[in-house]
Image: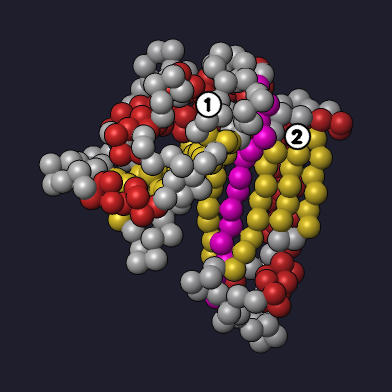
């Protein structure tokens, strides 16, 4: 997937040694996957200890790791059957209603993560803080920031969506260690590469469709072209282009280190260097 980058920028993504392929659900990740733990590092940062190369500021503005979930609004602990009504639209009023309903779940999950991080990474009081203002909780640590949020589903307001974002990682020994990746084991399914200048989604669609039937690369998109999804047969990851970002989506949850190792293993399958190289605005 990363072959859209200029060759001078690819060093950030290329491992020093070959990573194990991202196999089926039962496959074990490469033992050296933790070396790739990194997230949302600005162009001023160098990933010391992970790679000696800076992020390519010409193309990628930041990287983050994401997890998404959801459920029925009426299943939240704060929902009282016979007293509350399931939302049928997304409005400021129903959004505030959701914030009250999810407060218990959000606070409990955030507190669990606070305690787990404090124990696993041997943090002191000054190294870690938690702020919960439903429907959002922010765990700010010495080495990273984790944000948890709830929102009503625009397509089905009777359901809610959750989003977990790992960002603001600082380079150092902690993010390369087993304890850090163990803390987030199985949690994330996406790597988001925010593009500094962006791409036109329509141009990406046209370029892929112009490759012809001989190309294994396929593209799917809605009628409003708000995004497109690139897939290659027999490759477990898909690439979602939103114009502002390229999001690599994997079929199962993993730690940041495992996802970066998996990304390195599948990037060449998305032979889109010729497709995207001229589309970065």
Q: Residue 233 lies in magenta, yes or no?
A: no
- In-image side of 272 versus 14 (left or right): left
Tag count in the figure?
Answer: 2
Q: Is residue 25 visible?
A: no
Q: In which quarter of the image is residue 173?
A: top right
| Label 1 residue SS | loop
Secondary structure character of the magenta stretch overall: strand
**Residue 266 location, x and y as percent?**
34, 31
Taking the spot 35% from the left edge, 67% from the top edge, the residue there is: 223
Vertical comparison of 249 with 73: above or below: above
Which residue is tagged 2?
141
Vertical comparison of 136 with 2: above or below: below
Stretch in magenta? 158-171
Taking the spot 75% from the left edge, 34% from the top edge, the residue there is: 141
Q: Residue 56 carries which label?
A: 1
**Residue 65 location, x and y as percent?**
55, 40
Q: Which of 197 and 169 is in front in this view?
A: 197
Q: Which mark is residue 64?
A: none
Mark found first going from the N terminus, 1 or 2? 1
């Amino acid at each position: 997937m990363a072959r859209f980058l200029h060759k001078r920028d690819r060093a950030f993504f290329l491992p020093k040694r070959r990573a194990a392929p991202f196999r089926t659900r039962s496959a074990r990740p490469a033992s050296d996957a933790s070396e790739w733990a990194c997230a949302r590092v600005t162009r001023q940062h160098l990933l010391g200890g992970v790679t000696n190369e800076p992020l390519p500021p010409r193309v990628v503005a930041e990287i983050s790791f994401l997890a998404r979930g959801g459920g029925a609004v009426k299943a939240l602990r704060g929902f009282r059957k016979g007293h509350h009504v399931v939302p049928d639209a997304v409005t400021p009023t129903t959004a505030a209603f959701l914030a009250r309903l999810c407060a218990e779940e959000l606070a409990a999950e955030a507190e669990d993560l606070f305690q787990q991080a404090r124990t696993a990474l041997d943090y002191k009081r000054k190294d870690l803080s938690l702020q919960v203002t439903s429907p959002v909780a922010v765990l700010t640590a010495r080495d990273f920031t984790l944000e948890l949020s709830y929102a009503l589903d625009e397509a089905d307001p009777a359901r809610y969506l959750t989003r977990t974002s790992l960002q603001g990682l600082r380079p150092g020994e902690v993010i390369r260690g087993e304890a850090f990746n163990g803390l987030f084991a199985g949690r994330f399914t996406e790597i988001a590469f925010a593009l500094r200048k962006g791409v036109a989604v329509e141009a990406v669609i046209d370029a892929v469709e112009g490759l012809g039937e001989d190309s294994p690369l396929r593209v799917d998109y809605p009628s409003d072209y708000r995004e497109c999804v690139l897939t290659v047969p027999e490759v477990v990851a898909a690439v979602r282009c939103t114009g502002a970002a390229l999001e690599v989506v994997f079929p199962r949850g993993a730690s940041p280190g495992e996802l970066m190792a998996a990304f390195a293993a599948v990037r060449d399958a998305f032979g889109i260097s010729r497709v995207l190289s001229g589309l970065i605005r």
